[in-house]
Image (spheres, grey):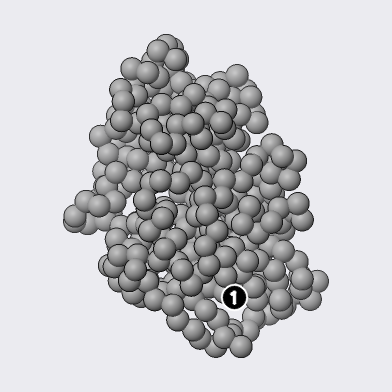
Amino acid sequence: MTVTEIVLPGLVEPDGLRVEHREMPRPGADEALVRVEATGVSFAEQQMRRGKYFDQPPFPFVPGYDVVGTVLEAGDPALAGRRVAAMTKIGGWRSHVVLAEADLVPVPEELDAAEAETFVVNGITAYQMLHRWAKVKAAGTILVHGASGGVGTTLVQLARAAGITVIGTASARNLDAVTALGATALDYRGDVPAQVRALAPGGVDAVFDHVGGPGIVDSFRLLAPGGSLVAYGSASTKDDPGNSRLPVFKLFALLLWWNVLPNRRRAHFYNVWGGKRNLTRFRARLAEDLTAVFALAAKGDLTAQVAARIPLADAAKALALAESGTVTGKVVLVP
């Protein structure tokens, strides 16, 4: 048996991805061989093909930030046949993957693979930013930039399920979709600061900003006293020439400076892999938070935003679609 995988060979356009095959791996003592049923196209892969993801490996490599699938073989025989999810960071764009058993999280039977996949890295990111970092309480108000994207749609729904008012920015074509999720939708090309101040004169309790760039200053200024800015990317710089780490370092420095000032507001940079130095604690939190997100989805409090289901072999098409900015939710690869 062989494994089908998608290789990112270097700085290429989406059609430069390669479909390759290799021998089926075998799991070790504490590992599991998983047949992948869904893997996603996230913003990370869009940055990686440009060489702009902060800590991506050298080319060539197999992208793929997360997977959902069924365990075929494992060191623990009790895992065989179970549907599981895992974050991989890279390597997920394969038909089969070998993963550490400790990284596997059970997936409820109520969710199909593509639905569950939209909640893995997006769900963990949104849940932890909202509840572990910003700690927004019910009746609060938040601003979500990119509210029609994978993380954004999940964040809007998690906030609404918690009784939080949401203002979300999106492109004009996606405003109706954001409104349908329960947010007040704003065209990001308009005067967003003025519109947010009109809706929340005293400021918002939290801003979630994946864009970075000059607009991050407006995000911070829109906070109410005691509010939190959670930055989790620098999308606005993905096509900028030069060192890929420089925009992130500049963002770090700015957030640090704001935290030094006596302004009763806080700024954070969220990294889903943060805290991995304490691997046991990291895995426990990841499993706890993803299980909570899956439970909300199984109850119907969250609706999976699957923009498209595309065969793994057509990963080039999937990546181009995700980068087009024309879809709401997440593009999912189905091996």
Q: Position of residue 198 (x, y in %)?
A: 40, 13
Q: Residue 103: x and y, percent?
A: 63, 63
Instruction: State which quarter of the image contains the C terminus.
Output: bottom right
Where the N terminus falls, by quadrant?
bottom right
Task: Indicate left or right for 77 with 90 as reference.
Answer: right
Q: Quadrant of residue 221?
A: top left
Res 284 seen here: no
Of 25 and 280, which appears nearest the observer? 25
Position of 114 with respect to 321 (left or right) is right
Q: Three-letter amino acid code at disc 1? A: His
Circle 1 SS class: strand
275 versus 57 height, above or below: above
Q: Position of residue 172 (x, y in %)?
A: 38, 33
Residue drawn 65% across and 72% down?
34
Residue 133: x %, y % from top left: 52, 36
Residue at 63% over, 84% down: 26
Of residues 117 and 222, the one nearer the viewer is 117
Residue annotated with mark 1:
96
Answer few, some or many: residues within 10 Å of disc 1's Cα (few below 14, many 20 plus, some between 14 and 19). Answer: many
Residue located farthest toward the right when viewing the structure as drawn: 78
- Residue at image location 25% in from the left, 34% down from the top: 214
Quarter residue 117 falls in: bottom right
